[in-house]
Amino acid sequence: MHKLEIKNLYVNIEDKEILKGVDLTINTGEIHALMGPNGNGKSTLLMSIMGHPKYEIISGDILIDGKSILELPVDERSKLGLFLAMQNPQVIPGVTNLEFLKYIVNAHKDKPQKLKEIYKDIKDQAEELKFDLHMLKRFVNDGFSGGEKKKNEILQLKMLNPIFSLIDEIDSGLDVDALEVVAQNLNSIDLSKSALVLVSHYDRFFKKVVPTHAHVIIDGRIVLSGGNELVERVNNEGYSWVKELNK
Ligand SMILES: Nc1ncnc2c1ncn2[C@@H]1O[C@H](COP(=O)(O)OP(=O)(O)OP(=O)(O)O)[C@@H](O)[C@H]1O
Ligand SMILES: [Mg+2]
């Protein structure tokens, strides 16, 4: 079993206080839903866990299996099993998707593999996602549609097999069929070795990938946690009742 712990985390962006004491523990075997109104710190939390340098950790800690990862750069965190599917995936002109996938896979291996050695795996994973193979030869996310970018994030995830997958609004921009395919791919992940943290605003996504835990983040704090029933209540009633509880 593996454990990701966030302890009393305070994070600033450009001197603005965004996270104000977040506590969260995620064990393998769990699927955590993270909800909350726009601009309240969900992406900030995921970016901070992954180690984006723009997010300044003021205090608190982030630990994997009891060891702090705060001093580790992003690539080291990735090697420990963290993965972030970004809300706004980055475009990398000049680097093809195939080359990029080869680089990220090899960054996790002692002995680098040639593209032809991993191509079959890439092709199989892409086909499972119904991701057009022509997209593999294009520059990473360059000119991709919103939905294509989101699928490309999941393709990277599938190639890396992370322990802790942080997945930020993967459903936004996906058409109904693509949403179904992405949900199937997420549901096929072996949770005995991994855990998912899913940010989404929509109950229809959490009906397909059913969380074991749910949290509401408001003004940089997790103000309410529960099980799957919390997703439904937020869907039906919005956030005003949660804000009332915390007055
Ligand atoms: N460079 C910056 N300078 C100042 N504030 C910033 C900067 N970057 C982000 N923020 C602010 O940080 C807050 C938290 O943003 P974050 O992206 O974490 O929200 P979110 O909960 O993911 O929202 P959404 O549901 O819209 O994705 C927002 O108010 C945002 O405007
Ligand atoms: Mg966000």
Image (cartoon, rainbow, N blue to C red):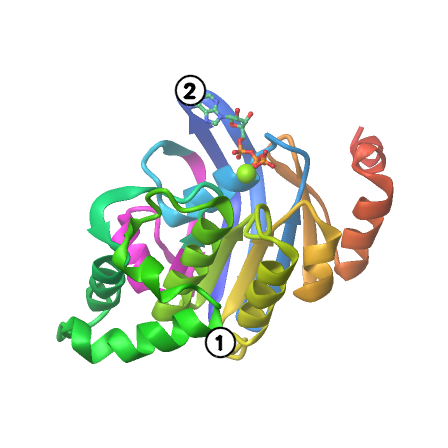
Calculate the distance from the C-alpha at mark 1 to the C-alpha at mark 2.
37 Å
What x and y, as percent, mark residue 121? 32, 78
Residue at horizontal 76 percent and vertical 60 percent from the top: 228
Q: In this view, does 49 lie to the left or right of 237?
A: left
Query: Is residue 172 in view from this perspective?
Result: yes
Magenta range: 58-83
Cβ atoms at labels 1 and 2 below 8 Å apart: no
Disc 2, SS? loop
Residue 61 vertical placement versus 164 (above, below): above
Residue 59 shown in magenta = yes
Q: Is residue 102 left or right of residue 135?
A: left
The dot on residue 1 is 1
User: What is the three-letter code of the residue carrying label 1?
Assistant: Met
What is the quadrant of residue 205 in the picture?
Answer: bottom right
Disc 1, SS? loop
What x and y, as percent, mark residue 160? 35, 68
User: What is the three-letter code of the residue carrying label 2?
Assistant: Asp
Residue 236 vertical placement versus 206 (above, below): above
Q: Mark 2 points at which residue?
A: 15
Specify which label sits upstream in the sequence, 1 or 2: 1
What is the quadrant of residue 131 in the picture?
Answer: bottom left
Query: Is residue 212 in view from this perspective?
Result: no
Residue at horizontal 42 percent and vertical 20 percent from the top: 15
